[in-house]
Amino acid sequence: MPTFVVETYGCQMNVHDSERIAGLLMQAGYSQALEGSQPDLVVFNTCAVRENADNKLYGNLSFLAPRKAKDPNFQIAVGGCMAQKDQDLILKKAPYVDVVFGTHNIGSLPTLLERARIEEQSQVEIKEALEHFPSTLPSKRFSAFSAWVSISVGCNNTCTFCIVPQLRGPEKDRDESDIVREVQTLVSQGVIEITLLGQNVNAYKNGGFASLLRQVGAVPGLERIRFMSPHPKDFTDDVIEAMAQTPNVMPHLHMPLQSGSDAILQSMRRSYRRDKYLGILDNVRAAIPSAMITTDIIVGFPGES
C-alpha cells in the first residue's frame, strides 16, 4: 500500500482542504506515512498570500529533487492557491513535479496521480469553477474532538491586498441543512467543538449567519462553536445576539481590522471605517462582557507613513 504525506501552508481553509486530500488518498488505497519514514507521495497544499510559504515550497521541492531522480515511482503533487495562480510556472521551476492541481478540483487528485504514473509525464489540471464543495469529499480529520466545517468558499469582496477572490472564485454558500447534517454526524463521531469556516464567514446567505449559528448551536452534544473569519461590513447586531444567546458559541470574536487609519482602509478598499469597527466592538462587549477579541493588522501597507 503506497504511503503519503500532506504538507500544508497558509490559512485554516487550506488545513480543511488538506483533511479532504488525505481522505481522498486513503479512499484511493493510500495510507498515511509513519513519522520518520519515506513516503511514496508528497502533496504540497500551498498558499499564495504569504511570501514565506512561496519560498518554503520551492525550497522543499528542491530538497526532494534528488530522490525523484533516483526513484521515478516517487510522486510529488502541488495543489492549493499557489497552484491555482502559477499553474505551468511550477513545472518550469520544478519539472519533476508529477501533478499540479487547483483549489477547485481537489477531488481530481487520485485520478491525476494515476494518469501521471501511466503516461510517465506531469499532469496539470486547473479548473476555473468549483467541481465539488470541499465538505462533500471524504475526510481524514486531524483531531478526534474538534473539526472544521466549511459553510462557504470564495469571496465577493475586492480588497486591494487580497488575491483570494481570483484563486477561490466568487462566494458560494452551502445549504444550511447540509451544514447542520455534517455537524450532527461529527458530534455522533465524538467531536465536541466545531469551527465554521468561510473566507467571509458572516456574509453567509446575505444575512443568514445568525440563523445558522442558532441552528448549529441547537445540535445536541455540541459543546463549543467558533467561527472565522468575519468581515466588519457584514457583522450585524443579530449575529451579536446569536452569540450572546447561544450558550455553546464561544465568547471569542476574531475580526480582522487591517488598519486603524481611515485613509489606509479606503486605499485597501475595505468597506468600513475606524468608527464602525469600534462601534461593533462596543456592541459585542455590551452583549458579551467576557468576550475575547482578536484581530489581524497589516503593517507597512503601500502609502502608509
Image (cartoon, rainbow, N blue to C red):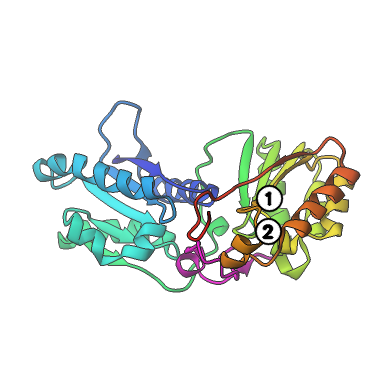
Q: Which residues are magenta?
A: 153-175
Kindly state the secondary structure of the residue where label 2 is placed: loop
Kindly state the secondary structure of the residue where label 1 is placed: loop
Label drawn at residue 255: 1
Q: Position of residue 75 (x, y in %)?
A: 23, 48
Q: Residue at x 53, y 58 (%)?
A: 134
Is residue 40 visible to the viewer in this orientation of the structure?
Answer: yes
Task: Sort mark 1 into few (<14), some (14-19) or many (20+) by Cα contacts within 10 Å.
Answer: some
Label drawn at residue 231: 2
The answer to whether marks 2 and 1 mark residues whose Cβ atoms lie closer than 8 Å is yes
Q: Nearer the viewer, residue 265 or 226?
A: 265
Q: Position of residue 287 (x, y in %)?
A: 90, 45
Q: Residue 236 colored magenta?
A: no
Q: Position of residue 111 (x, y in %)?
A: 32, 60
Q: Residue at x 44, y 61 (%)?
A: 103
Q: Residue 173 colored magenta?
A: yes
Q: Earlier in the sequence, mark 2 or mark 1?
A: 2
